[in-house]
Image (tube, rainbow, N blue to C red):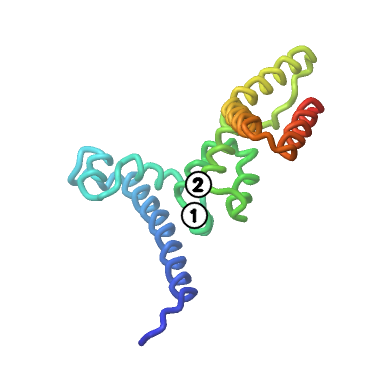
């Protein structure tokens, strides 16, 4: 019986995954060349017709590969991946290197990257600054707090439901220990 080594298989899969990323980069490079030289016009009206008629990926995906190829090196594409790099292109250049480092160091996943992109999207090249107007700044902080409170309403409701359920259960029993626990819990709540 042949013993299968998980580490060996994992290494093979990682190698193949890296080659997929490089293939995407190479495809983008080749498509850029075809577009630049207008070679697609030999048999097709447009680059879109050429891509949709010959490949299983969409024109939009092809555009992403082409765009990333024009902005990042093959080494960066291998490390990070086409999808994440395309997301990074939406971040202003001032912040891009900072976010790339987070992605390279695996400190951020795709969802975290989307949040970072959303955070930086639309900002100019300078770091965000606080308003010099105190009232405006306080108003902004109040709105942020209000938004946070709205987001946590469900958590508070769940906590209230759990609390009420626990209280009703302890009231059903006349056990002195439960009564003492309920009184201590009420005291703690008053402190909060």
Q: Quadrant of residue 4?
A: bottom left
Q: Residues within 10 Å of mark 1 (few under 14, many from 20)?
A: many
Give left or right: position of 141 versus 33.
Answer: right
Q: Position of residue 162 (x, y in %)?
A: 60, 33
Residue at 53% x, 39% y is 114
Q: Is residue 183 above or below residue 102?
A: above
Left or right, 180 with respect to 66, comes to: right
Q: Is residue 115 left or right of residue 38?
A: right
Q: Nearer the viewer, residue 170 or 110?
A: 170
Seen from this angle, which residue lies furthest left?
Answer: 43
Q: Where does the C terminus fall, quadrant-wise?
A: top right
x and y, in percent, of residue 123 in the image: 62, 29
- Circle 1 SS class: helix
Task: Look at the numbered discs 2 and 1 and tell me whether their residues touch, using CB distance below 8 Å.
Answer: yes
Find disc 1 in the rendering and name its residue: 77
Front residue of 153/16: it is: 153
Residue hosting label 2: 85
């Amino acid at each position: 019986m042949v013993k299968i080594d998980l580490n060996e298989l994992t290494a093979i899969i990682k190698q193949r995954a890296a080659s997929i990323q490089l293939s995407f980069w190479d495809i983008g490079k080749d498509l850029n060349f075809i577009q630049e030289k207008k070679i697609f016009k030999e048999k097709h009206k447009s680059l879109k017709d050429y891509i949709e008629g010959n490949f299983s990926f969409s024109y939009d995906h092809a555009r992403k590969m082409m765009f990333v190829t024009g902005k990042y090196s093959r080494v960066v594409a291998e490390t990070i991946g086409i999808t994440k790099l395309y997301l990074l292109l939406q971040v202003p250049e001032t912040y891009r290197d900072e976010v790339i480092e987070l992605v390279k160091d695996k400190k951020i996943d795709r969802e975290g990257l989307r949040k970072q992109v959303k955070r930086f999207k639309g900002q100019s090249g300078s770091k965000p600054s606080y308003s010099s107007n105190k009232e405006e700044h306080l108003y902004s902080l109040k709105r942020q707090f209000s938004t946070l409170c709205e987001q946590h309403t469900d958590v508070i409701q769940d906590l209230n439901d759990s609390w009420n359920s626990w209280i009703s259960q302890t009231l059903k029993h006349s056990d002195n220990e439960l009564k003492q626990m309920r009184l201590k819990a009420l005291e703690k709540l008053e402190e909060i």
